[in-house]
Amino acid sequence: MDVSQQVQRVMERIRQAALAAGREPGEITLCAATKVQTDETIRAAIAAGVRVCGENRVQELAAHLAADAYAGAEQVHFIGHLQTNKVKQVVGHVDLIQSVGSAHLLQAIQNQADKQGIIQDILLEVNIGREAAKSGFAPEKVLPAAEASLERTHVRVRGLMTIPPADAQRDANFRYFQEVQALYVDMNQKLFHNELEYLSMGMSG
């Protein structure tokens, strides 16, 4: 199965899942992870209809940007763990940083965006499984983190992101997703006047 067929297969699964849930398929954004992919594969995915590319690694992001591999995509997101010493290489180079999971990283992004004179869109990462080895805000820390973001003039929270524990069973995943969705709704109503756009949950499976 070539890249075009794979993209169409995923989009059809999204369409069927959306309709089964009573939603419009157009409301769902497919973010294609480009980790360890070649420039040619990324270009083929975009040609097949991918509109948002998600990069996990700073070094690969820089290489793909230099090669103009994302040309034709509407947005590029950074979806991997971001170290504060690499913030300079990401801020201003992507449309959305999905993985902001600490106050320290939030401030580093604010500082770099301030230097560039831009506003960087971000998602707050929720460590919904409270995993010690995973970054992200604990569920009870999400609202305070969102409040702190509102005090920073060069970052803009657009929603929440979470990846449940890798060993979680299907029913457990649904519970995690429901918890994060509830956090999103609460945060959206209390702080953002229902203007948030993104609830990024899950992974390839």
Image (cartoon, rainbow, N blue to C red):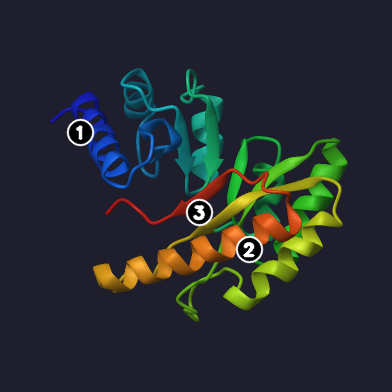
Q: Nearer the viewer, mark 3 or mark 2?
A: 2
Quick one: SS at disc 1?
helix
**Which residue position is annotated with label 2?**
186
Position of residue 102 relative to residue 158, above or below, is below
**Type of amino acid under label 2:** Asp
Q: Quadrant of the N terminus?
A: top left
Task: Tell me the residue that label 1 is attached to.
Answer: 9
Q: Residue at x 78, y 57 (%)?
A: 149
Q: Position of residue 197 (x, y in %)?
A: 59, 43
Tell me: residue 91, above or below residue 202: above
Question: Would you say 37 lies left or right of 80 here?
Answer: left
> What residue does disc 3 label?
80
Tell me the tag on residue 183.
none
Confirm whether residue 165 shows in the render: no
Please name the amino acid that badge 3 sits on. Gly
The residues bearing labels 3 and 2 have C-alpha atoms spaced at a distance of 26 Å
Q: Which residue is at 27% across, 71% downward?
A: 171
Task: Using a 10 Å C-alpha cutoff, classify the residue at mark 2 as few (fewer than 14 neighbours), some (14 to 19) or many (20 or more).
Answer: some
Dot 2 or dot 1, earlier in sequence: 1
Calculate the distance from the C-alpha at mark 3 to the C-alpha at mark 1: 25 Å
The picture quadrant where one finds residue 202 is: bottom left
What's the distance in space between the residues labelled 2 and 1, CA to CA? 34 Å
Percent x, y of residue 134: 50, 72
